[in-house]
Amino acid sequence: MWAYAVRRAAIGVVLLVAVALVTFVLFFATAANPARLACGKNCSQQQIKVTEKALGYDQPLYVQFGTFMKGLVVGREFPADKEVRERNPELVTDCGPPCLGYSVNVGTTVNSLIVQAAPTTISLAVVALVMWLIGGVLFGILAAVYKGSFIDRGVVGLTLIAYAFPTFFIAVFFLKYVVIKWEILPYPGYVTIADGGVFTWFENLLLPSFTLALVFMAGYVRMTRAFVLESLGEDYIRTAKSKGLRTRPVLFKHALRAALTPLVTMAGLDFATLLGGAIITESVFAYPGLGLLTVQSSSSFDLPTIVGVVLVAAFFVIVLNILVDISYAFIDPRVRLG
Amino acid sequence: MKLRRTFAATAAAALGATILAACGGGGGGTDTNSSGDTESAKGGTLTVLQHFPFESTDPQRIYYGVELSWFRRLLYRGLVAFPMDDSNEVVPDLATDTGTSSEGGKVWSFTLKDGVKWEDGSDITCEDVQYGTSRVFANDLIIGGPNYTLSYLSSLDYPGPYKATAKQQAAFDKAVSCSSDNKTITFHFDKPWADFPLAAASLMMTDPYKKSFDQGDKSKFKVLSNGPYKVEGGTWSKNKGATLVRNDEYDPSTDEPDKLRLALPDTIDYQIDPSDTAGELFNDRLIANAPADQTAITTARVAPSQFPKITGSVEDRYQNPESPYNDYLVPNFNRLKDVNVRQALAAALPLNDYVKALGGDRSATASETIVNPALDFPDNPAFADDADNDGDPDAAKALLEKAGVQTPYPIKLGYSKSPTMDKAMAVIKEGWDKAGFDVTLAPLTDTYYDVISKPDDDYDVTWAGWGADWPSAMTVLPPLFDGRPNISSTTCGNDYGCYDSDAFNKLVDQAAEATDVDEQKSILEDADKQLGEDVAYIPLEITKFNWLYGSKVTGFTTTAASSSYPEIGLIGVQQ
Amino acid sequence: MTSPANEVDEIATDEATHHSTGPSTAVVSKSPTRIAMERFRKDKLSMTAFSIVVFFFVAAVLAPILVKTGVLDPFGTNQDLLNEFSLPSGKWGGMSSSHPLGLEPGVGRDALSRVWYGITFSLAMSISATIIAIVLGVVLGIVSGASGGWADTIIGRLIDLTLSFPQTLMLLALSSVLVTFISDKLHVPSGNPSQAVYVVAILGLFGWTGIARLVRGQVLSLREAEFVQAANLMGASRARIYFKEILPNLWAPILVSFTLIMPTFVSAEAALGYLGVSIGPPTPTLGTVLNDSLSYADTDPLYFFVPAVTIMVIVVSFNLLGDGLRDALDPKGNR
C-alpha cells in the first residue's frame, strides 16, 4: 500500500513537470508581447526591450523554464535584476519554495495570489459538492425506489434539463430573475467566515454553488439510481429482504454500498476539477477565486500567474486521483493495491 | 488607448469600459449636467460601485482616465489640477501658481505651497516631486503609467532611481532640479513643451512620491495620500476596493475646495465587483434604488439593453453626456494604396445605422473628425461634407470605377470582438457590400492592438478608439499618424494603418515647435485636413456615457475634467 | 459485457452485421441487433428523443438551402422595426408573422433565422469534433488495450496529462495564438474556417480520453475471447486482429458514446461562444446568438430564452437517445 502510494506520487511529480513544460511552451511561445502590454501605450522600441529584459522574456525559453523549475525547488528573489536588489533592499520580495513566480501585473508573488484566491474556490467547491452529493444521492434513491413512476421520470428529467442549459445562462438567469427581479435572494458577493460568520458566508455561496451543483447533479442522480436498481435485484438484497429486513435499512446499508465506489471516483474527480477554479461561475458571480484569477491573468497576459494556476489545478487533479485510488482499498476490501 | 478585453461578453457597452486614457477637457461638446439638487451637506457615506479592478494605485503607474481624475480629487493632489468644470484652464494645487516657463517653453518651474502635507504628517517637498518624476524613468519596475517625460528628457539616458549611477543621478537632479529651500522644482526639457501644465494636471507622472515610502512593486497598491481622504489601512485591495476616510493632515486652507474638491462625504466606500455581469447588475440595482443603493454611484455605464427601464423617476437620476472618446476606422496604407478606394469606403459608410446598432442616440453620436469636440476642434471637411451620414453607395461605386479596380472589391475588416461590435460591424458590412465591396468581418480578441499594428497584417480596414491624454490635439494626431516614431520593422505602433506622409509629418514638427497653444492648434487643424484628404482615418462615433445614481446622491455632475465620468469632487450624499 | 454469456452475443453480432452476405443457417430467428431495435422501438421516450434528433438534423441540413432560396434571412437588417432604444418594437420581442420568433435587438435581424442557421453550424462543429474524439479514442484505446506494456503505459499517462489540464482556461488563453497558427502554418483560410478548425480540433483533442478508456477495457476483455484466440492461432497479424476482429465488436459502445459526447460538445460550443471563441460574425452559431441574448434577460425575454432553450432541447434529446440506445443494446449494463 505504501509502496503503491509512493509510486503513484512519483508518477504524479513527473506529470506535474510535464504539465508545467507544456503550459510553458504553449503560453510563452504566444504571438503576444507581454512586455509591450506591460510597458504602456507610448513605449518606444527601446523601452519595450528594457521592459522585456526586466521581466526576463529576453531569455531563451529553456532558460526561462530552468529558472522557473529552480524557483520551485529552492525559491527565488524579485526583482530578477540582481543589481537592483543589492542597491535597493527595500524593493526585494522573497519568494520561498515552491516559488511559482512573480506577477508584475499585480506586483506580488504568484504564490500569494493563489493563497488569496484558493479559500474562495475551496468554499465554493465544497458547498457545491455537498449540495450535489446530497441532492444526487437522495434523488437517485427516490427515482430508483419509484422506478417507472412519474417521480422517477420527473427527477431524472428535471436534473437532465438543468444540466442541459448552459452554465452561464443559468447563472445569468439567477442573477437577473432570482436576485434582481424577484428579489428572493440578496446579490451574492464573497464573504469570508472570519468577516461575516458562517451564515453570511453560506448565504452568499448559495447561488453560485447551486449553479455549479445543477451542472453536476444529473450525473449523480443517474448513477445512484442505476446502482441502487442493480443491487436491489441482487441475490443478497433479496435475501436480506426475504429475511424480513425493512426496506430502508436494506437500501442504505446494502444497496447504497454498491454505489459508493463509483460515486467516490466521480465525486473525487469532479471536485478536483472544481478546485482548479470554476471559471464561468466565478466570473459571472465575481467570486475572487482561482477561476477569476485565471480569467483576469489571461486577459492581461500575466504569464507567470497563468502558469501558476494551471500547475495548481493540475496538482489538485493528480493528488485527488491518487487519493481516490487509495480510498478504494478502504471502501472495498476486495481491491488490492499493488 | 487600449481596450483591454475582459471576458465580458455580456457587457454590451464594452467600448471603453476600461479605457486607458486620461482626461479630456475644454468647452464645447460636453454639457455640464447638474442634478438639480444643490444641497451639499457634508458627511455621510458615498458608495462607489466599480465593475473593474484598477491595475495599480501608485500615482506613477495610473493610466485609467477615471482613476486619474478621481484620485486627483480624493488622494493625490498634483502641482496643478483641472477645476471641476469644462473650462480647460488649470489652477494651482500643490504649487502656488500654474507654473512659469522660460526659454520658449523648454523650462518650467513650480513652487510648492506652505503647509501641504502627506497623510503621515510630513511636509511635501520639492525632493518628493523630483523623486516621483524620476520613478517614471525606471521602466523596468514602474510600468504601465504614462511616460511622456521620457521623450522630453531623452538626452539624459537615465534608467530611474533604482539603478542610476551617481553620475546619471546627478545629471537627472540637474535637469529636474530643486531650489535650496526645497520648495521650487524646475524642469529643463530637451525641447519646448508648450502645454506641460495640462499634462501635469491630467497625468500623475510629475506627482510627488515620498522616497522612504517606495517599495517598488510592493507599493503597487499602497497609498500615501496628500488629499482630503486616505485609504483605511493604507492598502487598496485589487478585487475588493477600499474604504476612504478623512485625512486629518489635509488642510483645506492650502487648497481651493470650491474649485478642486469639495470632499463632502465623510467616507467613500469603494466596492469592486470584477465579474462579467457586474456593470449591468450595478445599474439594475440603481434602477431598483433599494435603501442601501440610494447613496451609490457607479463606474459602469447603463447597457443599451437597459435603456427601456430608464423612465419616470429613474430618468431623474440619469445623465447622458458625450465622452472624450472617439472611435474611427483605419485604412491600411500597405494594402489600400488608391485614395479613391479609401474615399469610396468613407462615402459608403452607413454611419447612422451603425450608431443605431450601438444602441442609438444614447450610446453614440456620429462624428466628423477624430478629435473629440471637448478639445474645441473643427470638423474635418473631408467627412463633414457628406452631412447626412446615411452612406452613399452610388458615389462609392463611382469612386471605385474611377479607381479602375475590379468589383466586388474584397475588404477584410478587423475589430475588437464583443456582441455589440459584432452587430455594428455587420451593419457596416451590409452598407459596404451594397457599394461594390465584399467585406469579411474579422473579430479579434485579446491582443487586438498588437495584431493590427503589425505592418504585414492582412486587414484592409481596422477599427480603433482613442481619447486625448490632455486637452490638446497634440495627444491625438501625432501619436496616431506620425509614422516616424511609430513605424519600425516589426510594428506600426499606434499608427495602425502604417500611414506615413511627409506633408503631415512636417506640420506635426511645426506644431511641436510652436510656443503658443493657439498657434499650435491652427497648425494641427491643417494637419487634420491633410489626414482627411488622404483618408488616413474614417471617423465613426463619439461614445456617449450613460450614468445612473442613487436618489440620495447630491451634486451629480459630469465635466470635461472628469472625462465625462461623475465628477466625484462635487458629489455628496443626503443624510 | 464482460460476462462470458455476452461474448456469444458479441460473436453473433459480429456475424449478423459483417457476414450477412452468406445465408444464415442459424436456428435463431432474430439477430441481437434486431432484438435491440425492437426493444428500442418499444421505448416511447427514446423514440421521441430520436424523432427530435432527426428533426434537428433535417433542420440543420435544410437551413443552408433555405438561406440560399431566401426563405430564411439571418443577415438582413431591419432597423426600421426597432424603437429608439434599438430594441424590437411591439410585444414579444417584435414577434410577427414574418418574424415568428421576433427580432435581434440592435440591428433587427430575424431571430428564427439566426437560431435555425446557428443550429447548422453548431451541429456541424460538434459532429466533426465528436468524430475526431472517437477516432482518436478508439485508435488509442485499441492500441493501449491490445499491446499492453509500454504503449499502454504511455497512453495511460497521456490520458492523465490531458485530464490534468484545466481545459476551459487553455481553450481561452490559447485561442488567438492557435487560430493564427492554423491559418498561417496549416494554410487554412483565415477567419471563420480557422476559427472552426480550432474549436473542432481543441474539443476533439480534449474529448477523446473517456472513449479511449472505455475501448481499452473492452479490448482487454475481448482479447481473451475465443474468436480472437482462434484468429491468433491461425497466424493473423496483430493489426488485423485488432482492427478487423475486435473493432467491429465495438460498434455498440461507440454508437452510444457518440450520442453522449456530441451533446457535451454542443454545450461546449455554447460556452466557447460565450467566452468569445467561436465562428465569427455575421455567421451565427447557437453559442454566439446565446451570448448576445444574455444582456436582454428582462428587456427582451423572448430573445433571452429562445437560444438557451434550443440548446437545452438538443442536449436533452441527444442524451435520452444515447440512454435509450444503451439500454436497448446492452440491457444489463448500467454505465
Image (cartoon, coloured by chain):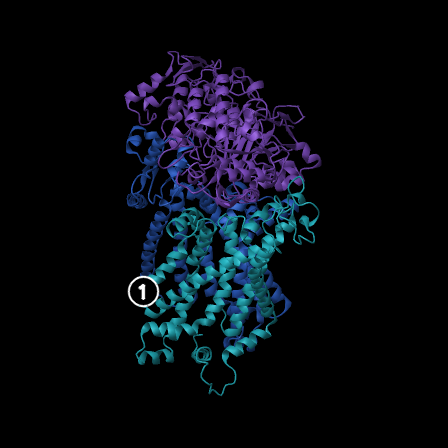
Chain colours: A blue, B purple, C cyan
Any part of residue A185 in sight: no
Which quadrant would residue A143 be assigned to in this image? Answer: bottom right
Chain letter of the residue carrying label 1? C
Any part of residue A133 in sight: yes
Where residue A228 sits: x, y (%)? 53, 69
Image quadrant containing the N terminus of chain A: bottom left
At 46% from the left and 36% from the top, the residue drawn is B338
Which quadrant would residue B148 be assigned to in this image? Answer: top left
Indicate left or right for B413 with B285 as reference: left
- Residue highlighted by disc 1: C151
Q: Is residue A279 above or below residue B96?
A: below
Q: Nearer the viewer, residue C98 or A3?
A: C98
Image quadrant containing the C terminus of chain A: bottom left
Q: Nearer the viewer, residue B541 or B469?
A: B541
Where residue B567 sits: x, y (%)? 58, 26
Q: Nearer the viewer, residue B178 or A144?
A: B178
Q: Is residue B291 above or below residue C35?
A: above
Q: Mark 1: which secondary structure?
A: helix
Where residue A61 sits: x, y (%)? 31, 44
Which amino acid is tagged 1? Ala
Where residue B507 sits: x, y (%)? 44, 22
At 36% from the left and 69% from the top, the residue drawn is C145
Query: What is the tally of numbered marks visible in this picture?
Result: 1
Is disc 1 surrounded by few (<14), some (14 to 19) or many (20+) residues within 10 Å? some
